[in-house]
Image (cartoon, rainbow, N blue to C red):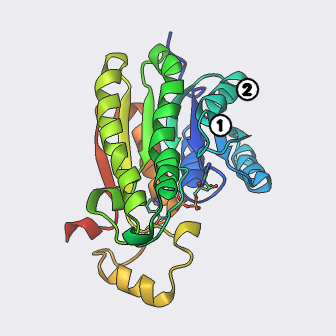
């Protein structure tokens, strides 16, 4: 039997700040109960959970280092025990390793692939038993335009984000029988801690190449994630959706 609207559980990774937190807040505003994954900053995660609770929502924080094999399954299990089985995943946890290709080490490649792509698969796999029992399972992977158009000095990051498109398409095919969907959101530049080191000159140059002339906000990405998790988005699957202010239009 499908879970009634409003009591469904969503797992959001990287949920203590930035895009992940904005996704969690957008989902909570639509009635989802939230499992919030954070890596190490318990205070930040508690604040994120409290903000949702103060707005009348349900949220609980769970620590997990998603660059460690096995953590994804343990995380989903802990969330399921505490809140019920998650039927939606927004995988936003991520970190960029910026280095010219000539200097990138195999271990750095492995770490980027583990955090972005391998953990995405492991999380999705761990959600499947719950998604199978739902009639509206949702997988949303936060990719990057880097994975679509490439990014100089960040090949491992771009490759690990690009892998999400193949994962989402394959998952979309496998999960269609349960009416579940799988998609990638590919942000361009978004104002978060990840871009906080961009100085004014870099920001101005980047913004000049964006038709809408500015970086996006985490809330804008969150709104898209909440839509993709909604029942209304039930016919959108296997897609990579750019949210980049038109940057990729050339
Ligand atoms: P952020 O640094 O604010 O958030 C990243 C989150 O991922 C943090 O909560 C961090 O704790 C978590 N994280 C990092 N390593 C982790 C690990 N090993 N295990 C568990 N959690 C870990 O940055 P953000 O911009 O909010 O990034 C969110 C996602 O959006 C990332 O996947 C990022 O690649 C993607 N993205 C961001 C931008 C941008 O311009 N900000 C652009 C494209 C894609």
Q: Dot 2: within a 10 Å radius of its alpha carbon, few (fewer than 14), some, or many (20 or more) residues?
A: few
Q: Is residue 197 left or right of residue 203?
A: right
Distance from Cα at disc 2 to Cα at disc 1: 9 Å
Instruction: Kindly identify which numbered label has been placed on residue 35.
Output: 1
Quadrant location of the C terminus in the rendered image: bottom left
- Rendered view: 236 above or below 240: above
Of the numbered discs 2 and 1, the one sitting upstream in the chain is 1
Residue 37 percent coordinates (x, y): 65, 43
Quadrant in the rendering for residue 83: top right
Determine whether label 2 and label 1 are within 8 Å by CB. Answer: yes
Q: Residue at x 52, y 54 (%)?
A: 107
Where ligand 1 lies, by image quadrant?
bottom right
Tell me which residue sits at (20%, 67%) in the image.
Answer: 249
Q: Which disc number belongs to residue 82? A: 2
Label 1 C-beta lies within 8 Å of the nearest ligand 1 atom: no
Closer to the camera, 146 or 19? 146
Q: Position of residue 242 (x, y in %)?
A: 31, 56
Determine whether the residue tagged by mark 1 lies in a helix, strand or loop. strand
In the picture as drawn, the residue positioned furthest to the left comes out as 250
In-front residue for pair 165/179: 165
State the image coordinates of residue 52 (x, y, percent, origin top left): 69, 46
Q: Quadrant of residue 117?
A: top left
């Amino acid at each position: 039997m499908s879970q009634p609207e409003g009591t469904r559980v969503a797992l959001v990774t990287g949920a203590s700040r930035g895009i992940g937190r904005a996704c969690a807040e957008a989902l909570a505003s639509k009635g989802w109960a939230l499992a919030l994954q954070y890596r190490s900053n318990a205070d930040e995660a508690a604040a994120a959970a409290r903000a949702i609770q103060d707005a009348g929502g349900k949220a609980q924080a769970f620590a997990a280092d998603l660059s460690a094999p096995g953590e994804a399954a343990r995380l989903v299990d802990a969330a399921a025990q505490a809140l019920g089985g998650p039927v939606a995943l927004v995988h936003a946890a991520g970190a960029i390793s910026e280095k010219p290709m000539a200097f990138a080490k195999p271990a750095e490649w492995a770490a980027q692939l583990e955090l972005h792509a391998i953990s995405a698969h492991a999380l999705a796999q761990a959600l499947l038993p719950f998604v199978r029992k739902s009639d509206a399972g949702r997988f949303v992977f936060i990719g990057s335009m880097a994975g679509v158009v490439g990014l100089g000095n960040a090949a491992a990051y771009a490759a690990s984000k690009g892998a999400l498109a193949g994962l989402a398409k394959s998952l979309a095919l496998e999960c269609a029988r349960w009416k579940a969907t799988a998609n990638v959101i590919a942000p361009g530049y978004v104002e978060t801690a990840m871009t906080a080191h961009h100085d004014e000159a870099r920001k101005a140059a980047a913004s000049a190449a964006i038709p809408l002339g500015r970086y996006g906000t985490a809330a804008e990405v969150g709104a898209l994630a909440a839509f993709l998790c909604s029942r209304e988005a039930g016919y959108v699957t296997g897609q990579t959706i750019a949210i980049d202010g038109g940057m990729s239009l050339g």
